[in-house]
Amino acid sequence: MVQYVGVSNVVELVRSVGIETFLLGLVDYIEEDFRRWEEFEKSPRVASHSKAGVIELMPTSDGQHYGFKYVNGHPKNPSVGLQTVTAFGVLSDVATGYPCLVSEMTLMTGLRTAATSALAAKYLARKDARTMAIVGLGAQSEFQALAFRALLGIKSLRVYDIDPDAASKFRGNLAETDIEIIVTKTAEEAVSGADIITTVTADKRNATILSDNMVGGGVHINAVGGDCPGKTELQGDILRRADVFVEFPEQTRIEGEIQQMAPDFPVTELWQVIAGQATGRRSDTQITIFDSVGFATEDFSALRYLRDAVQGTSFYTELDLTTQPEDPRNLYGLFRQPAPAMQRSVA
């Protein structure tokens, strides 16, 4: 039997501890795995692109466990009542090859993306940062807001979306928090005076969500939306003025904001900053950018965290996913065993 954590399990688990507590625990696991970055097998995700979107596999291993996530990104899905992103993940034991956890990863991707964003800002944003702008109020936006509140104490948000209904949804979902939300009429108005800017739009196109004249000194940009080839949010001139931090350069140069730049455009890997091998923010006037595309180790961290969190609880079920013949060499023998009573047909 294999432990299975479904959507309802994740919802009830998060409710039981509180979403911000859950996010902080997830941050700890992600930070721990970034510190041991060199232990992991790493490769760019395997992607199958179409005009409608992308389907990807994101694998990694630390030598003891192997994990992967299946995930899609289809920006037009909401127009037909479907999620832009859906995902599931598997964590396996390297020693036997047997899966030990299968989990939904749609909710967990939202949570781990926000946790990674806040973790990066912990090292890259100014210590006195108090106000964040969010441009793009889709499925990821509330997670981002709560992660930054939990880890960095950000309680003042300036937000913008081209769809007024998205802003209403956002305000409604966070109405019971103490977060101050100012809905603006333009992206320019949203980022004015913000210490941290999060861009998290969904359209699969080379867009200019932030132009160079919108970004002043000292700002930290959490660039989340540019996450596949042909999809960007920042004007290239901003990148030239800033110090850019990435997860895995070989993947980010294909999918991130830096796909606009020359192949040798200088970047710093986030794990190096977290592990103390590189400098993050050097001054209060420096512009920092976390060019976030999401990487397999973050999903690995999320699967590890979820596995540990559900032990001894009712927040999982068991899947009859792996065969268990009495003689491992006699797989065919399973067909000769009497069928379970509930599965026998009535003559």
Image (cartoon, rainbow, N blue to C red):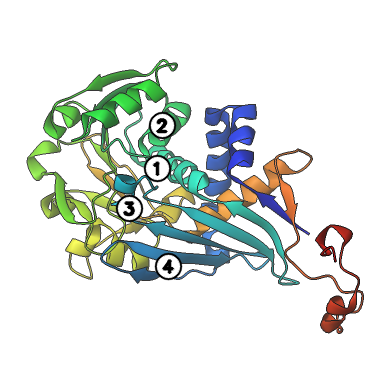
Compared with 79, 184 (above or below) is above
| Earlier residue among tags 2 and 1 | 1
Identify which amino acid the numbered label 2 is placed on: Phe
Compared with 263, 231 (above or below) is above
User: Residue visible at 32% across and 69% down?
Assistant: 49
| Crowd rating for badge 2 (residues with CA inside 10 Å; few <14, some 14–19, many 20+) | many
Circles 3 and 4, Cβ within 8 Å, touching? The answer is no
CA gap, disc 2 to disc 1? 8 Å
Single out the mark in the foreground, 3 or 4: 4
Single out the mark in the foreground, 1 or 4: 4
Q: Quadrant of the N terminus?
A: bottom right
User: Judging from the image, what secondary structure is the residue with disc 4 in?
Assistant: loop
CA gap, disc 2 to disc 3? 18 Å
Identify which amino acid the numbered label 4 is placed on: Arg
User: Judging from the image, what secondary structure is the residue with disc 2 in?
Assistant: helix
Q: Farthest residue toward the left?
A: 213
Q: Position of residue 333 (x, y in %)?
A: 87, 81
Identify which amino acid the numbered label 3 is placed on: Phe
Q: Quadrant of the C terminus?
A: bottom right
Q: Which mark is residue 245?
A: 3
CA gap, disc 1 to disc 3? 12 Å
Q: Which mark is residue 117?
A: 1
Single out the mark in the foreground, 2 or 3: 2
The residue that label 4 is drawn on is: 45
Q: Which mark is residue 148?
A: 2
Circles 2 and 1, Cβ within 8 Å, touching? The answer is yes
Foreground pick, 333 / 25? 333
Residue 12 left/right relative to 118 = right
